[in-house]
Image (cartoon, rainbow, N blue to C red):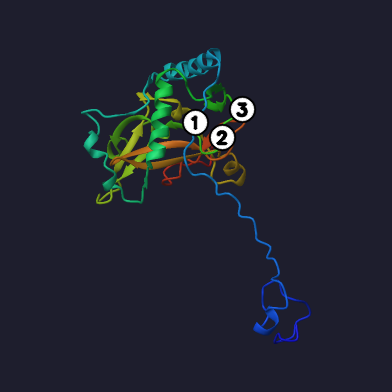
Amino acid sequence: MKCLRPAVLEIPPENWYCDGCRSKHPEVPQKRRKRLPKKSTKFLPYVPANDVESRNRQMDSLRFALQSKNVAFSDKLTYSHDMAPKSANQSKYEADDIQELSTEDYITIKKCKAMMKGGKCPPLKVVFDEVEGYKVEADGPIKAMTFLAEYTGDVDFVRNRRDDENFDSFMTLLTYRDSEEEDGLFICPDKRGNIARFISGINNHSAEGRKKKNLKSVRYNVRGKCHVYLVALRNIKKGERLCFDYNRQDSGYDTQHFI
């Protein structure tokens, strides 16, 4: 300690001995801070219910809700000659940054789509509330980063849907970079769609509303096309209502009246 300048009251934890004293003292062991494992950002495939009865009950709840809205089930984006052609959906036209979907996540989504096609649906059910209408609840525990659904429906130009009465269920798919006016593509689940159209939005004007968010909607560039995926933001318990922020991409929705 006499060798140190300025003098100190206790030996520092680091090896600060001079060359003459270092050979007389063993190195002081260093306490290394444990590094916490990084949270995985990879998609997890959803885990369907084990028994057929539960899966049938979940599918029946979706079937009833779609029929009541006169909507045909579709688990993919659809294009029509009288709306937006498939060529209009190109991620290179996007005005903002858009994430690239990794190969691993692409494989996970393909696996989930195959399970859905084979009748093994995600552990979700659609329930009806007299005040709020249809909503979606977890019918089993769901882990964070679990892929649950793609937001699907007909793809149409924003300019064609500005005055549509079903505007509250539309999802922004793409915003054109070079458009003179605000234009792009909407996903419109008024004729075709899946369970995603029944998932609730949060009131993002209140702290209480923001706490309810347990899903996130993310736009991805998938082989040159834009897609919107819904992924669990955190662990979700059975019976918990699913909610995400409708205004993640823009501020087009007025959510102050949301419960």
Q: Mark 1 — residue? A: 199
Give the residue type at disc 3. Lys
Residue 163 shows in this picture? no
Q: Mark 3 — residue? A: 238
Q: Earlier in the sequence, mark 2 or mark 3?
A: 2
- On the image, the x and y values in percent for residue 34 come to 64, 55
- On the image, the x and y values in percent for residue 42 come to 47, 41
Please identify the quarter of the rendering in which residue 153 is found: top left
Quarter of the image containing the C terminus?
top right
Name the mark nearer the viewer: 2 or 1: 2
Please identify the quarter of the rendering in which residue 155 is found: top left
In the image, 166 versus 145, the foreground residue is 145
In the image, 103 versus 85, the foreground residue is 103
Quarter of the image containing the N terminus?
bottom right
- What residue do we see at 54% from left, 37% from top? 258
- On the image, the x and y values in percent for residue 14 come to 67, 72
- What residue do we see at 59% from left, 25% from top? 140
Q: Earlier in the sequence, mark 3 or mark 1?
A: 1
Whether 56 is drawn above or below 214: the answer is above
Give the residue type at disc 1. Ile
In the image, 145 versus 127, the foreground residue is 145
- Label 3, label 1: how far apart the Cα atoms are: 15 Å
